[in-house]
Structures are given as structure tokens and as C-alpha cells.
Amino acid sequence: MKQHDFIQLRQKQWEAFAEAVKDPNKLHEYDIDLPHAFRQLTHDLAVAKSRLYSPALISRLNDLLLQGQQCLYKPSNRVWAPFWQFVKYDFPAQLRLIRPYVIWAHILFYGLALITFSATIIEPEFVRNVMPNSQVTELEQMYDPASRIDESTGNYRNERDSDSDFLMFGFYIKNNISIAFQCFVGGFLLGFGTLYYLMFNAIFFGAVSAHIVNVGFSSTFFSFVITHGSFELTAIVLSAAAGGVIGMHIIRPGQLSRTAALKHAGKVTFPIIFGAFLMLVVAAFIEAFWSSSTLVPNAVKYTVGTVCWVWVLLYTFPRTPRQGGKAS
């Protein structure tokens, strides 16, 4: 079916749906089964995407779908309603919309990190191609188990003061957001900036991890990074995926002008960037108040960290909603 025929077939239903969800308090005035119409709209969006209809049509259907979600699943708490709506529905919906970019960003980041990790394990001196000797020394001192033991007592040093935790919380937010911002903004350089920053951080992460294993400090390092790393690394990869969307819309605007294509890309990627920002705040909080704690046993950190990784991956790759009836 051609796009024009598809629009003519479904136009009245879309308009009725749009009118019905404008004011949820007046739903009784419309002769429409909203849940059924919502399922049909989900199917229409899937059809439009599978048949490679215009980005404008796909964007329109996606907006209607988001409005329907807000109407059907609107929480009663007005303070948390927008936030809950975004976290539970809007953010995953946008992740589904750019899923190919999310998949490729994950493959590129973790694939390159694994290659660098293996290269550094085989050739330990490779790490010095990634960072200077002074930084390598600082890294070893940071994760040396002996640095956490008070030489006078032979016991672990006391927890740092709460004021220091808050300072580190702010530092981690600033540092992580700057990395994610670079990955996203790099998309405006035809996507090459995004590729550079994503690959650089992947190489850095792989080399650092392998060097820590080589010097025998893996227990200290991995127990520290496993929990907050699930949110932090995923947010950086999602920022790169959003940057890839920007770059691709510049290179291949399709039937739209480049200005219109950029506006469309910005509309698609803004929820991704905001969601990545929330994930980085969570990561910074965990890193400042949980990961650095010497009172929490490593076994507990590994357990909680594993749960976080599983949850983040399931959230990042949400299932596609079930489709309704078939379109004619």
C-alpha cells in the first residue's frame, strides 16, 4: 500500500484519537474505545516504519502514541506525574524509535573496549599508548588495596566525610555529563565527532580495565565500578546513539530539507539526552555514596551491580508493544 492510500485509510481514526486525548476529562464525549485505538495506532506506527514511509508521518504517529500513553497511564500525583510518565513510557518509546542506533553504539563501544582489553592483557605496555606514565601511576595508587589500609592499625581506613561525598557527587556529575555531551554534540560534525569520542572512551575503558587486572587490583576496581558503571556507561552510549541520529539526518535528510531534518532529529533525540542525563545523575549518586564505601562487602556490591546491569539492559532494549489488528 502506498503512503497516500495508507493515510487516507487511517486519517479519520488518527484525527478522532488526537481529539480524544487532548482532554482526558472529556473522554466520555467521544465515541471511541481508547485502548483499542491505542493498540491500532501502535500497529500503524509499526507499519509506517516497516514500509519506510516519510519521517514526517512516522514522527506524527509517534507523537500521537506518546499522547495516548499520557492519557491512558496518567498517574494521579501531579508532582511526580510528568517524571514518572517520562521514565516509564516516553524514554523507552524513544529508545525503541532509534533502536538501530542504540544497538550499533553498544556494539561499537563494548566491541572496541573488548579488543583493547585483550590487547592490553597480551601486551601490558599497550596501556602507555593510551595514557601517560604519570596517569598510569595514579591509577595504580587509586585501586591499590594497600592504599585503603591504615598502616598504624592494619584496618581499613574510615569512610570519608559526608561533605566529601557530596563534593565527589558534584564532580562525578560534571565529569560524566561532559563526556556524554561530547558524544552527542559530535553528531553535528557529520557524526565523526560522535565516533571519535565513543571510540576514545571505549579504548580508554578497555585499557584501564586490563591494566588493573594485570597489576592484580581487579577486586578493588571491579567492585567499585560494577554498580554505577551500568548507568554511566549506558548513558554515554545512548548519548552517542543520539549523536548518530543527528549525524545521519545531516548526511541523509531524505525528503526533508536539512534544517527540517535537524529539527526532526532534535525532537527525537531530546528525550534520549534528558534520559541519559537522569542516568548519569543516578550513576554519580551511586559512585559517590555506594561504590566508594569500604563498609559494604564486595560480594554485596557484585550482587547489586549485576542486578543493576540486568535492569538497565532490559530498560534500554524494551520490548515492542503488541500490535493490534491488521491494517487493510
Image: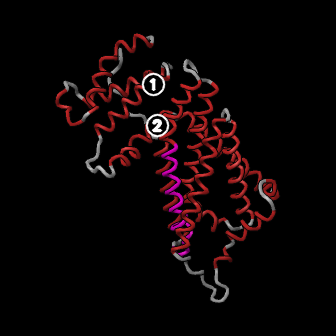
Q: Is residue 42 visible?
A: yes
Given residues 283 and 308, the one toward you in this image is 283
Q: Quadrant of residue 101?
A: top right
Q: Residues within 10 Å of mark 2 (few under 14, many from 20)?
A: some
Report x, y in % for residue 173.
56, 58
Q: Which kind of residue does numbered mark 1 sit on? A: Ile
Q: Classify 201 as above or below 287.
A: above
Q: Quadrant of residue 255?
A: top right
- Reading the image, the residue beneath label 2 is 94
Q: Is residue 306 visible?
A: no
Report x, y in % for residue 75.
28, 46
- Residue at 48 percent across and 61 percent down: it is 304
Q: Which kind of residue does numbered mark 2 sit on? A: Gln
- Residue at 77 percent across and 51 percent down: it is 119
Q: Which mark is residue 58?
A: 1
Dominant secondary structure of the residues highlighted in magenta in the image: helix
Mark positioned earlier in the residue sequence (1 or 2): 1
Q: Classify 172 as above or below 62.
A: below
Q: Residue furthest bottom?
A: 152
Magenta residues, as a range? Answer: 273-295
